Image (tube, rainbow, N blue to C red):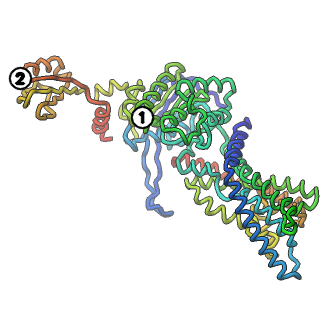
Amino acid sequence: MSLRPYLTAFGLQWKIGLRYRIAVIAGLVAQMWFGAVTLMAYASVYHAAPDVQAPLSLRQAMTYTWIQQSLFTLLPLGCLPAIGDAAKTGAIVYDLLRPVDMWNWWLSSSLARLLGNAVPRAVLLSCVAGPLAMLVGLGAWSLAPPASLLSAILALISITLGALLSATIVMWWNILTARTLSPLGSYAVGTPLAVLLSGMLLPLPLYPDWIRPFLLAQPFAGITDIPIRIYLGTPIPGGVATGLSLQMFWVVSLTLLGRLWMRQTVNRLEVQGA
Amino acid sequence: MPTPLPTSDAITVNNLRKTYRIREGGSWRGKTRDIVALDGISFSVPRGQIAGFIGPNGAGKSTAIKILSGILRPTSGDVQVNGLVPWTNRVAHVARIGVVFGQRTQLWWDLSVAEGLALLRDIYSVEPERFARNRARLADALDLGGIMDQSVRQLSLGQRMRAEIAASLIHDPDILILDEPTIGLDAPSKLAVRAFVHELCRDRGTTVLLTTHDMHDIEALAERVIVIGHGRILADSPFEALRTTTLSERILELDFHGTPPDLTLPAGARETARASQSVTITFDPRQIPAPALVAHVGHLPGLDDLRISRPSIDEIITRFYADHAA
């Protein structure tokens, strides 16, 4: 089987993601705003309770926040827009008419769309929040460099796995969309889950002790939380290897289960008509 | 990959049934009811034929088209398209057919026509030389030169439909399935689409299965009409044969100076309309040949002009549906 259709799907969605330059700028402004507000909140909380041993230092919490903000569009907030549109117009039947493996076809599209959205934003925001902020004397509020070279390399591997994991979760939203013939459900379920469980709202290491193991073990932690912990060099229970293994575990199991769900969904479309 | 069975027919359908289960009341516990969309249809289409598939809304046309395309699974029955069973060999099957759903788009709104075609080249793994050849041929035949670089969302309906047809043929399918390809098109676009499909069949021997509500499509294209109603095949014959068996009547219109006189007509002819200066007579040429009827009325006082016409195909088909209570 040739890889070409899937690379093409990837290229297409990557291009579409890059096409919305105004959205990148608007998103950047919004993310800077949310980032700054969050930082100020942390600063006042940390200064109000200087004796508490927090799992993250203030500087680490700030860096965590900046990376989260710059990777916001990497989160699986809902289905792939193209699949949402196709479900509404009925053009989704054409996806059944292509001589391709539908899972890989949609997955490569979804991954490219996430990366096409996230990469330009991440590069821009980390430049602004990192080196630029330091240059203008806001070093204390800036995005800190990685803990070490090794952390940087491992974080890069981990964020790649995180992107794949996110695209795999988007596949679940895509299937939900194909079943309900509307993208709304996927956003209603996907956005709150992703924002809450990825650590976007509050860094997962800052939750109470008793709930932290569960938060680390759920799939959304593998998208940005585990890569950021590796970047910061903060300890992960079981070490970096456990972090990477959790990510791989979720990619593999969500793929296997998702493929079953997809087969069942395609069967249902084939039985009931799209 | 399964070897295609040697057969001269591109499509064979045998006792095909499809029942949809509808949940009533919309709740989880609602009662279910079975709706029979196809009630055992059989037909075959030889290679290189254009077969028209017609029937009123809800007759089962779309269901049959979807099954033949491989996107719907029948309840029972046998289907072979190019020797393959569409729903069990989906990937191999869809690689060899082209499909156009007139009301849906298979091109990408965000891309130009050219980019969309290039994408389909990769999806269908068309070799570069073959792609370049096909693209040039289709651009020429469907007059796509001016719109290749426009994005699909900017195209008019007529332009888009021509691009859609090109998209369905970029991989040289043996069979083209057209589901209402002329819906909403203006007259020149309809003529262009018909002329193209006709040439495609003549020059390349592509088998075409066409559904439409536009009887002129059928008259212009289809060597053969399959009429479907209530999930059954009501007729399967050349269009001319359908015309003769369904509505062989002709219409004779007479214009007069002043008020038309009272008429006494021979058997097989009857007056069907009368206006201040004209009379319309409907007659069956098997009972009273046209020349005899014209001779009969030719001497009428005040007769100014007369015309003989055949009922329109829309009238024929409406009559056919009514006769079969479809």
Say which chain tag 1 marks: B
Q: Amino acid at mark 2?
A: Pro
The answer to which of marks 1 and 2 sits earlier in the sequence is 1
In the rendered image, the quadrant that contains the N terminus of chain A is top right
> x, y (%) of residue B143?
53, 27
* Disc assigned to residue B125: none
Q: Residue at x 88, y 78 (%)?
A: A53
Residue receiving disc 1? B186
Describe the element under mark 2 as helix, strand or loop.
Answer: loop
Say which chain tag 2 marks: B
Relative side of B159 to A56, left or right: left
Number of disc labels:
2
Q: Is residue B152 above or below residue A204?
A: above
In front: A218, or A25?
A: A25
Q: Residue at x 28, y 34 (%)?
A: B315
Q: Is residue B256 above or below residue A164?
A: above
Describe the element under mark 1 as helix, strand or loop.
Answer: loop
The answer, for residue A133, to whether it is visible in the render is: yes
Rate crowding at label 2 as few (under 14), some (14 to 19) or many (20 or more) other CA atoms within 10 Å.
few
In front: B154, or A93?
A: B154
Extreme residue toward the front, this view: A136
> x, y (%) of residue B292?
14, 18
> x, y (%) of residue B55?
38, 37
> x, y (%) of residue B120?
63, 35
Residue receiving disc 2? B301
The answer as to whether the residues below labels 1 and 2 share one chain is yes
Relative side of B10 to A152, left or right: left
